[in-house]
Amino acid sequence: MDIIALETHISFEAIFRQHYERLCSYAYTFLKDEARSEDVVQEVFIKIWEQRKNLIGSNQLKFYLFTAVRNNCLTAIAKNKKNIIIELGDEEFPDEITITMEAASSGADPKILLAKAMEQLPPKCREVFMLSRLSGQTYQQIADSLGISVKTVENQMGKAIKTLKVFAKENRIYLLVFCCLACRKDLMHSIGVFIEKWF
Amino acid sequence: MSSNSQIQDIMLRHLNGEATAVEAEALLQWIRESSANKAEFDLVKRLWSDTVDAAMHNMDVEKAWQHVYAQTVEKQTKIITLFPWKKMMAIAASVLLIVSAYYFFNRPVETVWHETLASNANKQIRLSDGTVITLRKGGKLLLPENFGKSSRQAKLEGEAYFEIIHDSQRPFLITTPRCVIQDIGTAFLVQNSGSTEQVTVLEGEVSFISKDKKGQELRLHAGESAVLEKEKLQRRVVETANLLSWKTDTLVFSNTPLSQVAKDLERYYSILVQLPDDLRSVHITAQFKNEPLEQVLRELHLFTGLEFQIKGRSLVISKN
């Protein structure tokens, strides 16, 4: 293997390891199936190696990866007619969205609660938000990737975070953690006093 | 409520690294206005980072890589070696000799490496492409027999300084026990010892890649340095003034703190320096050209009034 090939191989592996889980998580937002998400992402990487090797080492690569994963997910969904295609029109969703959660789930891990809350965001809002969080791209890149305006990206990001904020407050997802800690500290203190008194 | 949503937009742009300086300043002002605002910002910040974790699915990356590797890198390597064979089979026997000769010269042969050792002194190696490598005493450099024909490659153990004539068609690639370093037009220093490997770039740019599974890569520009230690590749700030003292036989101190002087002496004279904390900030200006340690210490004593005593392999610095 010559040197350029060796270097390409090393970079390719590094890129794969760096982005794989995030890309699968992004694919999951469309496919709702981990195994299918992995298939789509692996196909994208194999295609890069076969046809777009010049992308390896280019700063366009991340943009390409996330865009290709999205397109391939949508194609996979279209082929599998049982599912409904997610259409990204520019139509507005109501400004106030509330996310409801069963009372039983309060007290669970904040991350699980957040994941459930994100699933309940309106489709367009969720797609923009997930792409932003998983790819870490700029608003401009996200707009280009989804074929929408930067203003729309900004609006949807605002809507998502506002909704999650209300959700976090109502469900006290962070407060609960603090309460638990506080209780435990209290308990520890009592035990300490008790031990001091009796021994 | 429009100002509220405006400030939220700024918060998000700030968290995404896209806020302008003016916006960042406005946000800071707003946060300072009240503790409620501060709490609001903290909540958004927390959601910003927690939503990433919440959205993540854990995958078996290793298994996935094995699968992709088999269909990409591995497959291609096989095609390269198999292809000439297939071609040969299809060609008539009369040209078999030529074909096999062709194959012989083009097959991926085991490279023959020539070894250069710098056992007693530094060694300077000039290569056919104009590149100059200075190998520090104790180092070992391996060059392929056919250096420069289709590629430029070297293997290094120890410390060496590379002044490479850049050629974008044939990147210069240096491999060390744990790393691959590729020049992107350059003069740079590579140091590897038992557990660490360090690259410092004095001119141009290099790519520093770890050979482990992680394949970590850092691009280093002039004046930058990075270390691979315990499988972690990290940038590091280094004082470059006397980095090449072993090559130039010159030590230059220009209002340099004694803590740095100690490091430079350690590197050049291969000794250990014991320096009390309260003397670290004493500053020294001096220049030494190819001078024995004793002479250097006499002069340093003169400049600073401090005691410099050699005890075995150590240099002990103390107050009178």
Image (cartoon, rainbow, N blue to C red):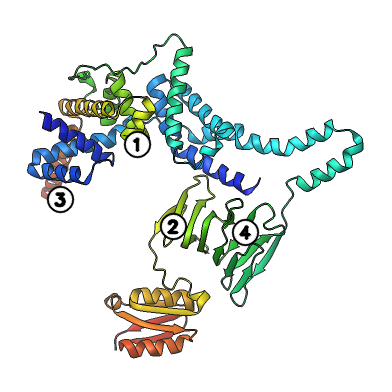
Label 4, label 1: how far apart the Cα atoms are: 38 Å
* Residue at point 15%, 47% (across, down): A192
Chain letter belonging to callout 3:
A
Chain letter belonging to callout 2:
B
Q: Which mark is residue A199?
A: 3
Judged from the image, the secondary structure of the residue bearing numbered disc 4 is strand
Q: Which of the 4 image quadrants contains residue A172? A: top left
Amino acid type of the residue that numbered disc 1 sits on in the rendered structure: Gly
Judged from the image, the secondary structure of the residue bearing numbered disc 2 is strand
Q: Where residue B226 appears, x then y in whole percent?
A: 44, 58
Chain letter belonging to callout 1:
A
Q: Mark 1 and mark 3, same subunit?
A: yes
* Residue at point 11%, 41% (across, down): B30
Label 4, label 3: how far apart the Cα atoms are: 71 Å
Mark 4 lies on residue: B154
Judged from the image, the secondary structure of the residue bearing numbered disc 3 is loop
Label 1, label 2: how far apart the Cα atoms are: 25 Å
> Earlier along the polypeptide chain: callout 4 or callout 2?
4
Q: Mark 4 and mark 3, same subunit?
A: no
Q: Which of the 4 image quadrants contains residue B142? A: bottom right
Mark 1 lies on residue: A136
Asked if residue A199 lies left or right of residue A82, the reply is: left
* Residue at point 28%, 37% (across, down): B49
* Residue at point 19%, 36% (across, down): B43
Bin the neighbour count of mark 1 within 10 Å (Cα to Cα): few under 14, some 14-19, many 20 and up: some
Viewer-closest of A198 and B52: B52
Disc 3 or disc 2, which is closer to the eye?
2
Residue B78 in the image: above or below residue B223: above
Q: Which mark is residue B74?
A: none
Q: Where residue B187 appears, x then y in whole percent?
A: 51, 63
Mark 2 lies on residue: B221
Amino acid type of the residue that numbered disc 4 sits on in the rendered structure: Ala
